[in-house]
Amino acid sequence: MTRSSRLTRLVLCGLYLVICSVGCRKEKECPSPRTSVDGRDKFVGQYKVYDTTGIYLYPMEIMKANDVGNDLVYIVNWGGRFDLYVQHDDGDHTNGLNLAPEFPAFDHEGNRWAFFADSDPVFLTNQLVNDTLRMSYEINNIAFYAEDGVPFFTWSYREYGVKQ
């Protein structure tokens, strides 16, 4: 065998090994498709609500709810007196709870109220921090108290809802 034929065989053998190693290589595993997580899930649960000094006030529950074209959370016993639907899209993964219920909001006794978030960046208005919902809101009945036959009332609240 001549030197050039040996060199040719060696090159062909090397080329064959390269082709075989590429052709027989284990295929990369494709990552499994991510399952969509509902952004409302983090809020769902039973809460014990405390004032800013740590005194227990009332129980509260948050559940997922749906309406045609709307993703909502349903809050039972917010403030110890309201059951509210609040808009929160299932694709919204932020920790903020957009407290903007329908106007007027009706309490457990059927009285009407203006109910809205009380902006407080230091308190982190209506943000879920770990397992604690930091609630900052205001209620007043200025538009309804005379007609509802109740005394005028307005108040700003700062409360902590601790998920159980």
Image (tube, rainbow, N blue to C red):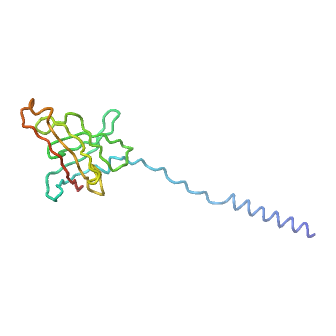
Where 145 falls versus 123 (above or below)?
above
**118, 105: nearer the viewer:** 118
Where 27 falls versus 64 (above or below)?
below
Residue placed farthest to the top in the image?
A: 147
The image quadrant of residue 53 is bottom left
Position in image of residue 40 (x %, y %): 32, 46
- Seen at 37% across and 48% down, the residue is 93
The answer to whether any part of residue 1 appears in the image is no
The answer to whether any part of residue 92 appears in the image is yes
Residue placed farthest to the right in the image?
A: 2
Position in image of residue 91 (x %, y %): 39, 44
- Seen at 21% across and 45% down, the residue is 137
Q: Quadrant of the C terminus?
A: bottom left
**95, 38: nearer the viewer:** 95
Position in image of residue 102 (x %, y %): 24, 35
Position in image of residue 86 (x %, y %): 27, 40
The image quadrant of residue 85 is top left
| Count of marks, rendered view | 0
- Seen at 31% across and 38% down, the residue is 66
Using residue 31 as the reference point, say whether residue 75 is left or right of it: left
Using residue 161 as the reference point, say whether residue 29 is left or right of it: right
**148, 2: nearer the viewer:** 148
Where 43 falls versus 7 (above or below)?
above
- Seen at 19% across and 44% down, the residue is 138
Q: Quadrant of the N terminus?
A: bottom right
